[in-house]
Image (spheres, grey):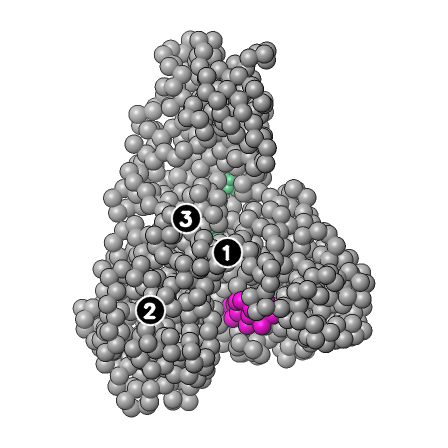
Amino acid sequence: MGIRYIDLGTPVRKSEREVTLEIDGMQVTVPEGTSVMRAAAEAGVSIPKLCATDSLEPFGSCRLCLVEIEGRRGYPASCTTPVAPGMVVHTQTATLAKVRRNVMELYISDHPLDCLTCAANGNCELQDMAGVVGLREVRYGYDGANHLEATKDTSNPYFTFDPAKCIVCSRCVRACEETQGTFALTIDSRGFASMVSPGQKEDFMDSECVSCGACVQACPTATLMEKSVIDKGQAEHSLVTTCAYCGVGCSFRAEMQGNDVVRMVPNKDGHANHGHSCVKGRFAIGYATHKDRITKPMIRASIDEPWREVSWEEAVGHAAAEFKRIQAKYGRGAVGGITSSRCTNEETYLVQKLIRAAFGNNNVDTCARVCHSPTGYGLKTTLGESAGTQTFDSVEKADVIVVIGANPTDGHPVFGSRMKRRLREGAHLIVVDPRTIDLVRSPHIQATHHLKLRPGTNVAVVNAMAHVIVTEGLWNQAFVNSRCEEPAFARWVDFIVDAANSPETLEAETGVPAKELREAARLYATGGNGAIYYGLGVTEHSQGSTMVMGIANLAMLTGNIGREGVGVNPVRGQNNVQGACDMGSFPHELPGYRHVSDAPTRQLFESAWGVKLEPEPGLRIPNMLDAALDGSFRGIYIEGEDIAQSDPDTQHVTAALRAMECVVVQDIFLNETAKFAHVFLPGSSFLEKDGTFTNAERRISPVRKVMPPLAGKSDWEVTQMLSNALGYPMHYHHPSEIMDEIARLTPTFHGVSYEKLDRLGSIQWPCNEHSPEGTPTMHVDEFVRGKGRFVITRYVPTEERTSRQYPLILTTGRILSQYNVGAQTRRTANVAWHDEDRLEIHPSDAELRGIREGDWVGVRSRAGETVLRAVITERVQPGVVYTTFHFPESGANVITTDNSDWATNCPEFKVTAVQVEPVTQPSEWQKRFRQFSEEQLSLLAHG
Ligand code: SF4
Ligand code: SF4
Ligand code: SF4
Ligand code: FES
């Protein structure tokens, strides 16, 4: 009963040198540094243990794993004793058996004996060990009573803490420190009186705990236990799949009872996460079976009419007829579609194929338009490939970590923990961010430099850093000479050495003290392996693409590219935003980032798909919306996207949706966009389909159907049905056939197959004849484009300036417990941590306006106004306010403007000039929003 995982007791050690020893008469050879316990386990000899587990450094507290070693006195603990050449170890002797029984007696004397009704029954290491050591009696009685009366803490929505069952092995404490890096747990008191406790004897919910669950996973007893296991019992089978939240792409085992998920356990063999997770992936999956799921196709003639539940055939037939009618009346280009970064690669590929082949135009775009499209443009231009250069593991070899406009501990928590581990080992940290993110100062971590720039001045900062490196002669001449284009570099040097780019000149503009910027630049250039990680704080600007190129310039200039420990790494937001881009979701690119104007590429797809393809790029999302308002764009197919919440200038988006004649939304919920739809096609969650996701390190990972789709069809089946109804036949039987087609048509995917994914677990593209098992590090000997290209990155201040009317700059970001538009996490117990978006404001700005903590404040920009509650904090600097955007009624995008990146139209979400003042009621937009939402919900058949 319960699913057991192999645990070799102590972590793997990597060493060139091997050691041979004898264990119970067997010769065993292991890398130097391996523990006796692990060496024995690898040879098939299992030594009893309680405080050791192979995900944590050994601690040596339980004394159950004692062994005899010839020539050594006493009984050393095998978990803390490293192997030595010629060592002769005995793990099973009469004396050891007696000692181990004694140890177990002590544990059991202070442990409740309710095994039969305990949630861990059948999957408890204490119970197992009592059996293994042959415990038959407890001479000390069963009333140790040191912990038995302790009260249970049920404050966390997802797990309980029952100190009565604690054996004080400290695995939880170590997991919180080593794996998660939060340091939320301590062991109080000493000896028998010792107790584990969150913070200063607080409840879990009041402590620093971020609910990652690492302690729950590490606990060998039922002390820390998932509530879902307490409710449902132990699982009976498991399937490996990939988290559908962020771009880290953690691998999980979905532990199941039939079609019911009992719990999600991070997969120790997962290459992106190595057995760790965050609160979202491990616990926040309740949305998948939430009562708000819409599982019946629906249609209606206008958005003021009630929805009518219909058959799949009728819904799809109606959508197809409408699209054909619109095309006949307004022209082929009057319809288009949006692919989803939440859906699988295979599904995304099919949607863009449908648009290009069945609609016959290139009007396809994706939500990367509003997040990482500048990454695509900037990295392709400079390095030749639109993707991050490293594996996540690479951070373990970084000496200087530069985090620009990203908040890994909230946005990419598992990678954030890895980064923190490396920082605790001594790597330096440079944070470039207007806000004091957690990384700047957290337990045992202190950023060497925090360049607290003014929002919108990224390019000035990156230019100033490059200026320092060039003018102080700190650049890597050998690398640049051999790896980069000479004329472009010479032109760039002329530009960058100009005094206009010096930190001193730019200090007034950026707000970053020149001295500190100089020191940071020197550290990055000379501190060893320098690795840059960046997020939406880089891309969502009017100079987003310029900044990406500025980062690439910096990495090339210092030779920090092409090996482990360095690189340029966009930390991608959504689970499959990399994949959505790879799969040809942009209007100008076919799968594999090949331009639609490239005749040989087009011919390849034309012969495979049997249609003529348009050689001109189609419309981007903002163009589609503008065209809807001017009457030339009348129908859209949106899969798994919520542009009415996620895109800038909400009122413009909703007006455009209202103007269309046929809006088809395929989603799991009636999201904000679906409230403007005429056809609703129920989508499937990641638990209900097969496919693949590609994470921020280009890692293609399997997604596996663990339960049947609630609406009867996976998303790829729905797209296929729509394509057939449109008259363009698709006949796939399984997503593996779609991947085979992708592999045939895309050079970077030539070597990818489901068989290989099953064999290797995951694959980092490019995977082809040159690198059959994938490519962990890119641009090793040469750049994908041949020579690296320096691009001149002139700083152009954004047009969005503060004024007397709008004196503050609003910038936005995410919080750990919520995810993007919140459609999923808002429907989970994660709302216990964050149930509304709030406005962070500096104490001095708050005082000036008479704003107190928790007050309602109106936030007014040139685009619109909304009302949020204020949080007064020094995390933000004076002149800057900040909010998250997880709740639609917050209207964060009502106030963002339609300014955008010059190259890609990525919206300038991170810079909006606003005024903030106390108010007493919601904004006019919020009132209209509430009324409209209520009306729309009442139009549902069961509404
Ligand atoms: S859930 Fe995570 S953060 Fe909370 S105490 Fe456990 S390990 Fe620490
Ligand atoms: S809570 Fe679990 S992991 Fe932590 S000390 Fe107690 S038994 Fe060990
Ligand atoms: S870090 Fe990202 S991928 Fe990993 S569990 Fe959390 S949300 Fe999922
Ligand atoms: S397992 Fe070795 S001392 Fe606990």
In front of the other: 673 or 419: 419
Name which residue lies at 56% across and 30% down: 18
Q: Residues within 10 Å of mark 2 (few under 14, many from 20)?
A: many
Viewer can see residue 625:
no
Magenta span contains residue 382: yes
- Residue segment shown in magenta: 370-386
Q: Nearer the viewer, mark 2 or mark 3?
A: 3
Q: Quadrant of the C terminus?
A: bottom left
Query: In the drawing, does residue 128 fall left or right of residue 272?
Result: left
Circle 1 crowding by C-alpha within 10 Å: few under 14, some 14–19, many from 20:
many
Q: Read off the residue under disc 1.
A: 775
Residues at marks 1 and 3, CA–CA distance in whole angstroms: 13 Å
Percent x, y for residue 351?
A: 34, 71
> Considering only vertical position in the picture, is 344 above or below 232?
below
Q: Amino acid at mark 3?
A: Leu
Eyeballing the image, is 614 above or below 885? below
Residue type at tag 2: Leu
Farthest residue toward the front? 769
Which is more foreground, mark 1 or mark 2?
1
In the picture of the structure, the residue carrying the numbered disc 3 is: 760
State left or right for residue 213 relative to residue 200.
left
250 within the magenta span: no
The label number, if any, that marks residue 350 in the structure image: 2
Label 1 vs label 2: CA separation?
A: 25 Å
- Percent x, y of residue 443: 63, 43
Asked whether mark 1 and ligand 3 are closer than 8 Å, the reply comes as: no
- Taking 123 as reference, is 85 left or right? right
Q: Which residue is at a point 55% across and 12% down the rendered structure image?
A: 70
Task: Locate residue 793 relative to residue 938 in the image: left or right.
Answer: right
- The reply to whether residue 20 is visible in this rendering is yes
Whether the residue carrying mark 3 lies under 8 Å from ligand 3 is answered with: no
Report helix, strand or loop for mark 1. Answer: loop
